[in-house]
Image (cartoon, rainbow, N blue to C red):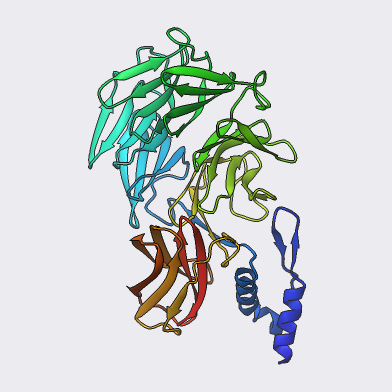
Amino acid sequence: MKTLKNIFKTILLITSKGNNNEVHFLLFSKPTILKHIPKIISILFLGMIFSGTMAQSWEVINSSNSTLPFNSVKSLNIDSRGWLWATNDSIGKFSHISWLEGNNWNQYQTTDKVMDVTSDSKGDVYFSTSAKEIIHYHNGTWYTQGSILLASSTTIDPVFCDKKNNLWMGKSGTYSALIKYDGAGMTEYSSLNSSFPASTVKCIQNIGENLWIGTKTQGLVKLSNNEFTIYNTANSPIPVSMISALAEQNDTLWIFSGNKLLSYKDKFTSTYQYPGDIKVIDMLIDKRGNFWFLSDLGLVEFNRKDWIVFNEKNSPLPVGNLTSFVVDKYNNIWIGTNGKGIIRRVEIRSMGVENETVKLHLSAYPNPMGNQLNLNFTMPQTGNAFVDLMNLEGKTMMTQNLNTVQQGNASFNINLPVLPKGIYLLRITTPFGSDVLKLTK
């Protein structure tokens, strides 16, 4: 009992500081306290989960602990199969393209310098290069399409697939242009043949029938019915001429420019401002609707109230060397780095924190677990559902795709792997919210 009192006294001395979520552990020299540190961490972890506070774990994937052939990552993408694609712009004479299929990294080499990667709904993957070419992966076969560009000093970056599987590319070099490839032919838009502005393309997004293009010096451009409309500092709330990143959520366009986050749906509406200077590289919106920014400050999360920065002080992220990021179907965020491989961030929240308006009512039996587990939950609407089981270190022990689940009460019986005795967290993820349940073995 005395030892437990000491443990809880120690927990009370653990503090959280500022928006950086830095956790400070007070160190003790007494062996009676030190040997109970694992218990302290477990109690703290579970307290964070079930009191509604965020908990996370980080996994570093590199050439020394996996079959990933490089540690400097240029770009990332997750295709419709769930495969993670990673590119490296050069190792010696070659650029490498790797993809994670299951637990194995596959590899393809090219002499072209690979710039960006995108994928369509059919599972085709496209890579832009600095050599006037697009590299195309289709059903296990690689193609090089080199007739896209005419100028010798041309780079294709970025690349983007719209919802109709058209490939869109930004072209820079002799002159800037927007290029569309529909599988049969190319259409090029530039200031030479259209009202597209003479500016480098920074980012591309698609909503409905409209294509949105963020530029380096001419603001935001909308392509609709083959007509271009330009939004800039003179005719919109956009604060500066450069659009750093674009993202889409529920047919709403989100724009990051300067240090402001703006939304557009028929008109400009919400505006949020980062409290300081920031240079954003890319932006995404996770399954819970939170915003994430890859920036010169590190990885930044915004929940529409607080800005939280993850850097060297509270994560393994090498600030200044973050290159690309994506979010998977389990809401894990994969971050490419220059020199440190790929870093995966797993976030766990309790029921009601991830989506306070949606109740999934997750339950499972038997508990303690055996070889099988019966799940019961409520789907507010028809949609996909995924289940994963994690230990207290945040390591995923099992994942299962439940595919499309109909609205209403749902029940599933799943087989469990061989697990050591301990405490586990069962998480269900849907488009409408998530739920976490504590289980024992």
- Give the tally of numbered discs: 0
Residue at point 43% right, 50% down?
63
Residue 28 visible in the shown view: no
Give the image quarter of residue 353. bottom right
Q: Is residue 306 above or below residue 50?
A: above
Residue at point 40% right, 36% down?
117
Asked whether, in this view, residue 360 is left or right of residue 257, the answer is left
Q: Is residue 196 above or below residue 412?
A: above
Asked whether, in this view, residue 200 is left or right of residue 162, the answer is right
Residue 388 visible in the shown view: yes
- Pinpoint residue 280: horizontal percent, then vertical percent: 61, 36
Residue at point 34% right, 81% down?
371
- Pinpoint residue 101: horizontal percent, then vertical percent: 32, 52
Residue at point 38% right, 12% down?
151
Q: Quadrant of the C terminus?
A: bottom left
- Name the residue nearer the viewer: 406 or 438: 406
- The residue furthest top is 192
Asked whether, in this view, residue 301 is left or right of residue 159, the answer is right
Q: Quadrant of the N terminus?
A: bottom right
- Name the residue nearer the viewer: 382 or 134: 382
- Pinpoint residue 343: horizontal percent, then vertical percent: 51, 51
- Pinpoint residue 161: horizontal percent, then vertical percent: 38, 33
